[in-house]
Image (cartoon, helix red, strand yellow):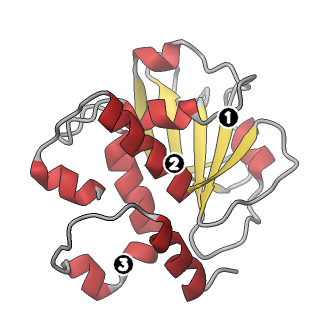
Amino acid sequence: MGNVNDLQSFLQKLPEYDKRELTIFDIAGYPHYENVISNFYEFFFTKDEKHGLGDLFLNALISLFPIDWIVPPELQLGYAVKREETTEENGRRDISIRCNNVDASVGTAIVIENKIYHSLINNLKDYKNTGKKNTFCVVLSLNTLKTQEDKVVCLTHYDFLNRVLELKKEESLTIPSKYEFILK
């Protein structure tokens, strides 16, 4: 299990930004809850949202996949982002990214398990086997986790978000200041 030191270590690795005012979320203490972070991820993964980043988050995630993972090309044509999908064994996927041209009963292409202050005890085999056979699973956590499960990659939030910012810079994307603030 993680603790405050894990969070402080994670935050110290983030790039420096201009000092900002505390938000209501900071004061309320919500930023460290998995569901809250997953809601932010859902917003930024949804390419048609007002943030103006398009599919940058998806591209950043795919760029961190092992080289031998072949992501279905139809995913690039269009996808839907879902939160808290129930699996065949009544598990709950934090975030699912499904090809638009695939029926909901068939499954997803990418499943993201978000970890903040909890160990990895999820049944990732169930997460991958619910629906489509070609489902990739990503575990995002504060610290690098390990699993022996096939087609599962473990990444840190830091590495993923750093890749998002790298691609944003490479693509010279300018987004509305409101969403830039939220992203930072």
- Report x, y in % for residue 138: 64, 45
CA–CA distance in space, label 2 to label 3: 21 Å
The residue most toward the left is: 177
Read off the residue under disc 2: 160
Q: Residue at x 33, y 65 (%)?
A: 16
Drawn side of residue 141 relative to residue 128, left or right: left
Q: Residue at x 80, y 45 (%)?
A: 125
Which of discs 2 and 3 lies nearer the camera? The answer is 2
State the residue in front, 153 or 129: 153
* Type of amino acid at the residue the image marks with label 1: Phe
Few, some or many residues within 10 Å of mark 2 (<14, 14–19, 20+): some
Q: Judging from the image, what secondary structure is the residue with disc 3 in? A: helix
Quarter of the picture containing the C terminus is bottom left
> Quick one: label 1 or label 3, which is nearer the N terminus?
3
* Type of amino acid at the residue the image marks with label 2: Phe
- Report x, y in % for residue 128: 72, 39
Few, some or many residues within 10 Å of mark 1 (<14, 14–19, 20+): many
Read off the residue under disc 3: 30
Rendered position, 164 above or below 86: above
